[in-house]
Amino acid sequence: MTEVTIIGGGVAGLCVARTLLDCGVGVVLVDRHKDIGPHACSWWAGGMLAPFCEGESAEEPVVRLGREAADWWEAKTGAVHRCGSLVVSSMRDTADLARFARRTTGFRQVSGAEISDLEPDLGGRFTKGLFFESEAHLAPRRALARLRASLLADGAVFVQEDADPDRYAQRGLTIDCRGYQARDRLCDLRGVKGEMLVLSCPDVSISRPIRLLHPRVPLYLVPRGDGVFMLGATMIEGHAGKHVTARALLELLSAAYALNPAFGEAEVLEIGVDSRPAFPDNLPRIRRNGNLIRANGLFRHGFLLAPALARMVADLIIDNKTPEVMDETAA
């Protein structure tokens, strides 16, 4: 195997390209956009490498396969922050915290004093929490930029074209990593809408992702450095519209205010909406039909599962090893 064409330059396509290139396979990466940007779902990702936290609602493979992510991103981009994840709830929502604990592993319970030690700017607001010490996070845009730069430096070829994977597959081995755009070929792929904000609040210092449990709108807050935070929560079935809903905006900002009232003075730098590609069970799929391999369905676990998905694609191509997530009944 000397060269593979990859269609799609988001997190899945870039990770597959990096993995194949590291295995000695040449790659041509084709995308309709010249560079990464707001058009990509991965541009709006939280960047939480939090497999144990995801176990609260995700299937077992997400937790197991997601444990590969932090080491992979550290090795390929050096952009990983290993500060753990902190889960908190208000006093009235302690039942939600207990439920989260029952459904997850890899944490230790922390008191209000320990929460204050971990995050002084949350001090006094929460009496109990869960600290997932082994988890990590990254800044998605920085990680993608570094990954793309490393691919260029190591000889990957980038082509700007609105490509048809089936046409490319007539020429040679092709991997379709187009995410939600691949719904034109994958009838069981759906979009799950996500809405998020980027805030600037220099008065608040938080060093790790915080998850605030709430019966209506669970929220995550991820530090980006220099007083900038990614704030997200929503998952709405259906194709994403162009704009955030008024209700989501109100609830996201209200939840941030509950974390620290200083967020009431934050500046809203960006508002983002995307469609996360998902199959019915919210697990990724690898499908092969001759020269065409489709790798898709990362759902909200793009940065968490893309390294494992890329590894399995490489194993299939190089060693003919059947991937764990292979869907052999569908082309």
Image (cartoon, rainbow, N blue to C red):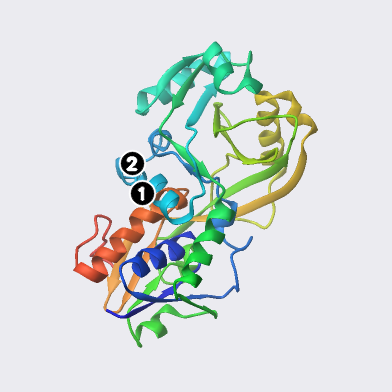
Task: Report the label total.
Answer: 2
Picture layout, residue 161 above or below residue 19: below
Picture layout, residue 279 above or below residue 98: below
Q: Nearer the viewer, mark 1 or mark 2?
A: 2
Residue 241: quadrant of the picture:
bottom right
Seen in the image, is 114 located left or right of residue 169? right
Q: Quadrant of the C terminus?
A: bottom left
Q: Position of residue 26 (x, y in %)?
A: 37, 77
> Residue at point 38% right, 35% down?
55
Decide which of 77, 291 is in the foreground and name it: 77
Which residue was labeled with disc 2?
A: 59
Residue 33: quadrant of the picture:
bottom right
Seen in the image, is 106 located left or right of residue 224? left
Task: Name the residue at the bottom extreme.
Answer: 171
> Residue at point 49% right, 31% down?
85
Seen in the image, is 206 located left or right of residue 155? right
Q: Which kind of residue does numbered mark 1 sit on? A: Asp
Secondary structure category for the residue under label 2: loop
Q: Please rate how many residues cluster around mark 1, counting C-alpha atoms within 10 Å: few if below 14, some from 14 to 19, many from 20.
A: few
Q: Which mark is residue 36?
A: none
Q: Position of residue 148 (x, y in %)?
A: 52, 65
Picture layout, residue 259 above or below residue 252: above
Residue 200 in view (yes/no): yes
Task: Check if mark 1's residue and mark 2's residue have beta carbons within 8 Å.
Answer: yes
Q: Please rate how many residues cluster around mark 2, counting C-alpha atoms within 10 Å: few if below 14, some from 14 to 19, many from 20.
A: few
> Residue at point 72% right, 42% down?
246
Q: Which mark is residue 281?
A: 1
Q: Which kind of residue does numbered mark 2 sit on? A: Glu
Decide which of 54, 67 is in the foreground and name it: 67
Residue 160: quadrant of the picture:
bottom right
